[in-house]
Amino acid sequence: MTTFRMLPRPWMRRMSYSMPDALKPRPVRHGIVLGYNLSGDLVHNLQDSTGTVAITTSARYHDGRLFIGSLMEPHIAVHEL
């Protein structure tokens, strides 16, 4: 929400970028995997509000399981389908 308020105000964005990291708000850890069919319709919407796999970069289905990867996490999450 704050980003939308800052869009029309470039000076505010520049000021926020120059703030020390300790003063910046922490991002919300929330992972999302979306699945679409060949027609482009959304058929799966898997969300992880616990933040176990927060920045999802890959998902692969194999033998009834979905393997979910992230460049930021030291593990691969497995979701049984």
Image (tube, rainbow, N blue to C red):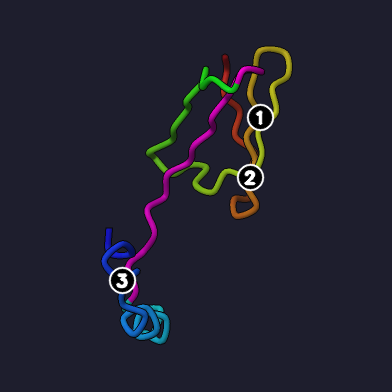
Q: In whole angstroms, how far apart are the C-alphas of marks 3 and 2? A: 28 Å
SS state under label 2? loop
Distance from Cα at disc 2 to Cα at disc 1 = 11 Å
Quadrant of the rendered image containing residue 40: top right
Identify the residue at horizontal 49%, vertical 46% (top origin): 54
> Which corner quadrant holds the N terminus?
bottom left
Q: Residue 10, how many percent across, how many down?
A: 37, 80
Quarter the C terminus occupies: top right
Front-most of residues 8 and 26: 8
Q: Is residue 57 left or right of residue 41?
A: right
Name the residue that disc number 2 marks.
57
Q: Is residue 30 magenta?
A: yes
**Is residue 11 rendered to the left or right of residue 64?**
left
Q: Tell which circle, 3 or 1, labels the residue nearer the N-terminal end.
A: 3
Residue 1 located left or right of residue 37: left
Q: Which residue is mark 1?
A: 67
- Given the image, on which type of amino acid does mark 1 rest? Phe
What residue is rendered at 42% in x and 50% in y? Answer: 29
Q: Is residue 76 above or below residue 41?
A: below
Q: Residue 12, percent across and down? A: 31, 81
Badge 2: how crowded within 10 Å, few (<14), some, or many (20+)? Answer: some
Q: Which badge, 2 or 1, comes first in the chain's sequence?
A: 2
| Residue range highlighted in magenta | 24-39
Q: Which residue is at a point 66% across and 12% down the rendered structure image? A: 64
Residue for badge 3: 6
Dot 2 amino acid type: Thr
Residue type at tag 3 = Met
